[in-house]
Image: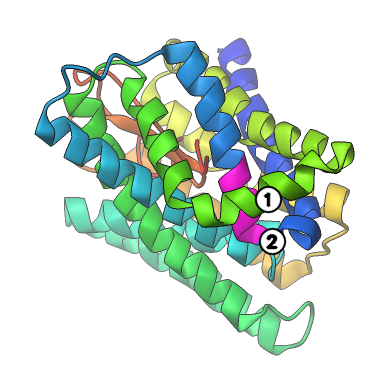
Amino acid sequence: MAASTGLIIGSCVSLQFGAALAVQLFPALGSWGVTALRLSIAAIVVLVAVRPRIARWSRDQWIAVTAFGLALGAMNGFFYASLERIPLGAAVAIEFLGPLVLAAFLTRRMLDVAWVGVALAGMALLGVDSAMGSGSLDPLGVAFALVAAGFWALYIRTSARVGRVIPGMGGLAIALLIASVALLPFGVPAVGVVAADPRLLALAVGTALLASVVPYTLELMALRRLPQRVFGVLLSLEPVVAAAAGWLLLGQQAGPLRLTAIALVVVASAGTALAARRSGEAVVGDAVATPTGAIPLPPARPAAGPSAGDERG
């Protein structure tokens, strides 16, 4: 159990520190350029590793994976757009509303609705903190994070569908490729910029590895050893790790109100994961989802819970 817990914590740390690296690329590439570049690098790595056999895919499989890829790209793009304007910890906390509201909608259990209420109380505290002027949150950045939350919920549903109709990791590989193609207008200029600057190229590769490849690998290893409710609770720590990464790498400060708001989101997410039934009633489908993306699982496997999960890429 200790080793598996370490894998999940390592995944959270890798994911959020990857996001912190991405922020350092924004001045040169813009948030959407960084998103496009990160997804493209991740797509290349996963495609080479998985080598999906797509020749016999049906029309339904292609529709499912296309929807998954577009949701993945939009989720990542709007999340990174929010990071360009608001601190990492606050952005992750706001984005967690997506899976929490989805869980409440799917289960219609009062307990899940109550957990969403706890998370909304955290969002209200973020608003109070911003209004009081202690590190005011940019309204557009908050709006982008809320849009990302909506696409996260959509992404969870589409990734669950892909997990059911496409075995293995082939669906994820092609979804990453589709997301990269959709963001090509942003990706082509970004490639030109990083090609002329080795430092930016190193940051871009580091972002793709830390925010995509490493979390995928660690989470898949952990899923073979941990009960999935435990997995979901551990991944609920992501907003805390994000706040720490923002403080350590980006110098982003957080006052007592903002930290309390993040704590409420963590409690709500962990509570939802613990309350999820083994039957999958309160979970997201056959996928592991995080603010940056998901790992489709074999169809027979129950889902991890609404707070579980990568990719945001």
Which residue lies at the image location 60% right of the left edge and 64% below the top edge?
81
Q: Report if the CB atoms under discs 1 and 2 are less than 8 Å apart.
A: yes
Which residue lies at the image location 32% right of the left edge and 27% below the top edge?
171
Q: Where is residue 195 in the image (x, y as percent from the top left)?
A: 78, 40
Q: In this view, does 231 lie to the left or right of 218?
A: left
Task: Determine the image quadrant of residue 113.
Answer: bottom left
Number of on-image labels: 2
Disc 1 on helix, strand or loop?
helix
Q: Where is residue 204 in the image (x, y as percent from the top left)?
A: 73, 39
Q: Position of residue 201 (x, y in %)?
A: 79, 37
Which residue lies at the image location 33% right of the left edge and 62% below the top edge?
114
Which region of the structure is painted magenta?
31-37
Task: Report the predominant secondary structure element of the magenta stretch.
Answer: helix
Task: Determine the image quadrant of residue 181.
Answer: top left
Q: Name the residue under label 1.
A: 190
- Mark 1 vs mark 2, foreground winner is 1
Q: Mark 2 points at which residue?
A: 30
CA gap, disc 1 to disc 2?
A: 8 Å
Q: How crowded is mark 1: few (under 14 residues within 10 Å), some or many (20 or more)?
A: many
Point out which mark residue 265 bears.
none
Which residue lies at the image location 85% right of the left edge and 55% below the top edge?
250
Q: Where is residue 219 in the image (x, y as percent from the top left)?
A: 51, 22
* Residue 18 in sight from this viewpoint: yes
Question: Looking at the figure, which quarter contains the N terminus?
Answer: top right
